Image (tube, grey):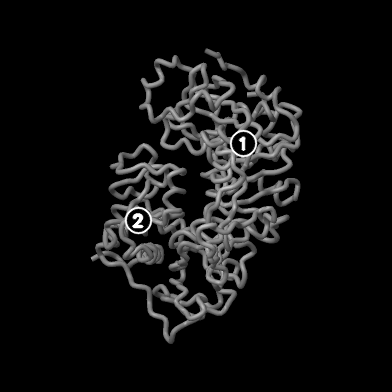
Amino acid sequence: MADKRTTEKDVVADLRDGMTIGIGGWGSRRKPMSIIREILRSPLRDLTIVSYGGPDVGMLCAAGKVTKVVYGFVSLDSIPLEPHFRAARQNGTIEAMEVDEGMLQWGLRAAAMRISFLPCRAGLGSSVMDVNPSLKTVRSPYDESEELVAMPALSLDVALIHANRADVRGNGQYLGPDWFFDDLFCMAAGRSFMSCERIVDTADLLKEGSEQTLKINRMMTDGVIEAPGGARFTSCAPDYPRNEELQREYATTPWEEFAPRWLET
Amino acid sequence: MSSAATRAEVCAVACAEAWRGDGEIVASSIGTVPTIGARLAALTFSPDLVLTDGDALMTAEPLPVGAPADAPRVVEGWLPFGKMFDLLWWGRRHVMMGATQVDRFGNQNIACIGPWAKPKAMLLGVRGAPGNTVNHPTSYWVPNHSPRVFVERVDFVSGVGYDRVPAGAAVHEIRVVVSNLGVFDFDTPDHSMRVRSLHPGVTMDEVRAATAFELAVDGHAPETRPPTDDELRLIRDVIDPQSMRDAEVKV
């Protein structure tokens, strides 16, 4: 059985300029921040980021790593607006594909199903259709009066996620109330890397949670990183809550001042 | 006898009224006052509403707003984000969202101010507003009624209004807009915004001055119904004992 343990450094060394990278978690919740930190230290650039966005998107924008962001929102939850993402949008330094949250899920699902689109209602009538000229509609072959959005597949080169527990084979476990869309991110991606709070023996996985908590199976992952506290300052229920103080500092400090401290921790 | 209702309490009851008659669906709310409203509706005239803890759990009994994450709760179901999308596409939901801008036909904007390509102010992003408004009833809450919020045209359509309803919508209903000044609906021949009621102490002139487009009015707009003594007790003692409502409605 393959031992998929690796490190943030090795994962990031494998990434290339211009890649499309999907990041799991949601807002400022259970983001793979230790891997993001390693990307920030690297010379990588021109990335396209697909995310239910939080400080992952903000930091990568602030550090000039990003060409394009695909999102439904970018928020720090307890601080509604992400300052660095806002600045990047307002200064016009990034391209954007802004879609409904459900459309984002649908795009990942289409990629996971290896089809080019999935139909949905979300988006119809809204400005999302005006500002994303690549979005097309499709007419139902069963009911000609039904015109729906054809949400294109959001295929990823790489997915990065953070789990509560994992084993060395690459099975991942979620102990909090919501695993968000981490499984879809992995299935939409060519390769996927999972950090986790703790690596445990496979035989011990069910000691902390039921079989329903085993959301990520080893077919979905190519590498596992043991990173205790790896989601900080975002929350990682039930292991730890968001570090609100550090998040506030991040949101109110110019990136040039915050970054050196952040990168050396 | 309770002391007189504050403006925030009137607003909470007006928000609760949005869910009257909704039956067994999820009442989702963004913001403190709408959340008080949803929980009040469930404790009084809409007992079948399904409530959440604002996170991934359905709660059988309303939690106080601002309850800590580890406060005890009776859980009756599980609604992580993936299931929330399933549910809202199924239509069993009525959400009350915020609106940075809302226009005459109920188009709502939470995405950006100024041109989308290079916004003057980037806000949250569209979130789920496009999908909500073509799948199930949607209402809006505006704690600071002003001409910058009630605009002639929104800069970006996040939530779809009555002049843009697509043929493919499963349902399209913008039920009410509740503000700190009154309650507004779209019950007019062309579905333009109408004054349904003014909160006690608010004049029509005040509302007109705070609205950048012409509101429809049927004769003399009635006063928003005041909270009952029982509703005031529930708001003050059960749902919002920390008076978080007063931080959202500053009148």
Instruction: State the residue at coordinates (58%, 45%).
Output: A107
Residue A211 in the image, given as x and y percentages of width and height: 37, 27
Residue B34 in the image, given as x and y percentages of width and height: 41, 58
Using the numbered discs, state the Cα–Cα distance from disc 1 to disc 2 in whole angstroms. Answer: 33 Å
**Disc 2 chain ID:** B
Residue A110 in the image, given as x and y percentages of width and height: 57, 43
Q: Is residue A198 above or below residue B14?
A: above
**Element type where label 2 sits in the image:** loop
Residue B81 in the image, given as x and y percentages of width and height: 46, 44
Which one is in front, A239 or A103? A103
Q: Amino acid at mark 2?
A: Ile
Compared across the picture, whether B9 is left or right of A187 comes to left
- Residue at the bottom extreme of this rendering: B219
Compared across the picture, whether A134 is left or right of A229 comes to right
**Disc 1 chain ID:** A
Label 2 CA crowd tier, 10 Å (few <14, some 14–19, many 20+): some
Q: Is residue A67 above or below residue B158?
A: above
- Please identify the quarter of the rendering in which residue B245 is found: bottom left
Cβ atoms at labels 1 and 2 below 8 Å apart:
no
Instruction: State the residue at coordinates (39%, 44%).
Output: B79
- Please identify the quarter of the rendering in which residue A246 is found: top right
- Residue at the front extreme of this rendering: A142
Q: Is residue B235 at least partly visible in the picture? A: no
Instruction: State the residue at coordinates (53%, 36%).
Output: A184
Which residue in the protein does label 1 denote? A22
Which residue in the protein does label 2 denote? B25
- Which quarter shows the N terminus of chain B? bottom left
Which one is in front, A91 or B176? B176
